[in-house]
Every structure is written in structure tokens, then in C-alpha cells.
Amino acid sequence: MSTALAATLQKNDATMRNTELTPPATQTAAIASRRAAGYLLLALTFCTALSFHGAQAQSPALGTDGRALDKARVGQAITLARAAKDSVFRSGDPDSPIPLEARAAFAGLAYFDPDPAYSLTAQLHRYGRPRQIPLLTNTGTQMVFERFGRLFFLFDGNEFWLEVHRNLEAGEISIFFTDATNGEKTYRGGRYVPLTELGDGLYLINFNRAYNPYCAYNPSYICPMPPAQNSLPFAVLSGERSYGPDVAEH
């Protein structure tokens, strides 16, 4: 990836992070824990504040799940970040995943509307002995990642978990997942979502930031595909939608 593209995407990611719902220093939390299949499941109830451009601003209203919501401000920042990504993909940067012949007609990526209901606080259970495992790619080859841990979270009153993997070169952790929208509203091969560390073993998984792998735009890219255990049984109507017809093999 070129320096220009990397810098723009890093700035875009920082903008997205500034929209996320993060716990204030004075938050109160009720955490009920229990063990199931050897893993700690946490029911989290938070009074949260919205971190926006580096400032903590308490939302005027609380959602029914106890999180402070400010849809207008979150939506505005996410929209700006998405426009920045479109600009990078449309540019003449040689590392844009949009094929050269398609860039002139590129009208931008498609997204679901921003929805704070998909910004979730989760508990990471780190594996005591992380090991390297192969993940299948869109071309049928394999890429090696570190099996980092399991992320437990609540959605619509139910408990779910996703396996977290760490990139061996960059050291970054992320989640590769599928859900009930794949092949219809979203890329059939699945999507990726980054994590934001909150401290004390808590992470923010914001599905508004879910994005397609590069092979969704261009079959010349080799991308790791989500493992079978990272299939969510509900529709994640958040983040990036399909890009035209699916062009990558899966």
C-alpha cells in the first residue's frame, strides 16, 4: 500500500473512532458474570458518553439499553469518513482496489445508514496459548493468522461470540465475520470489522465500521475469508453493503 493511501485511510479510521460510544471516567457499570463452556460471559450495562473530536459530550437521552445515543453527530462523522474513503478509492493512487478501468465511473461505496444500536461494548477472553492457524482465502489458498481470543457481546438481549485474529505482520487484531445479509445485501464472502480497546478487557465492536475485503472490488486481491465459527445468525444491517456484482470467487 502506498504512503498516500495508507495515510488517508489512517486519518479516515481515526475519524471513525471519534464517533464511537465510549465509557466516561465516571461511568457506573453493573457486570453480571457467569461461566458457560469454560468462558466468561458478561452482561454489561453502561451509562456512556459520546467521544466526538476528542471531547466528551453527554448525550441528552439514553437508549433503552442504557447507552447514550446521539445519532445525528455519530451519523455526520461516519458520513464524512465514508466520503474520505470514496475519495481515496476514486483517486489515481495505484493501490486503490478499484480496477483502473472502473474508476472513472466509480460513484462511491454503498452503506447502511449509521445506527448506534450496532456499536457494542464487548468482553475479550484472551487465549492462554495463542497459536498460529491458517485461514482460507477467496482463491482457495491459505493465510496464517494468530488465534487471539474470543469476543463476547450482547445483541438484542442475546449473547454471541466471535473469534478474534491478529495479523502477524502488522500486529493488528480484527474480526472476519459472516451474517444473514451475505449474498443479498452484503458481500457474499463476509466482512471485516476492527476493534477499539477500552481498557479492563473491554473492547468496542462497532459494526458501522464493517467493511468489505479488497477482493470484493477486484478479484486480483487475495483476502482471508471468515472462519465457519464466525457466522452470526442475525442480520447485521450496518456498515458497508455489496459493491456491484460480487466479482471475487468464494
Image (spheres, rainbow, N blue to C red):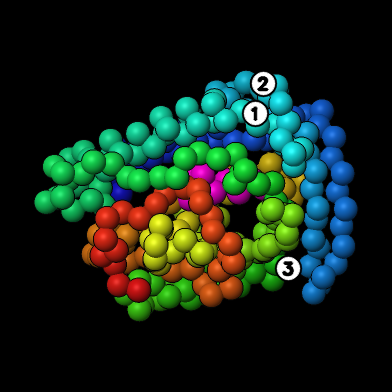
SS for dot 2: strand
SS for dot 1: strand
Q: Is residue 198 left or right of residue 235?
A: right
- According to the image, label 2 marks what residue? 57
Q: Is residue 165 left or right of residue 42?
A: left
Question: Is tag 2's residue or tag 1's residue first in the polypeptide sequence?
Answer: 1
Q: Nearer the viewer, mark 3 or mark 1?
A: 1
- According to the image, label 3 marks what residue? 128
> Was residue 247 drawn as part of the magenta stretch in this picture?
no
Look at 79% across and 48% down and name the residue there. Answer: 44
Q: Nearer the viewer, residue 92 or 129?
A: 92
SS for dot 3: strand
Residues shaded magenta: 203-210
Q: Is residue 15 left or right of residue 202?
A: left
Quarter of the figure with residue 41: bottom right
- The amino acid marked with disc number 3 is Gly
Residue 50's label in the rendered image is 1
Quarter of the figure with residue 72: top right
Look at 69% across and 46% down and name the residue there. Answer: 121
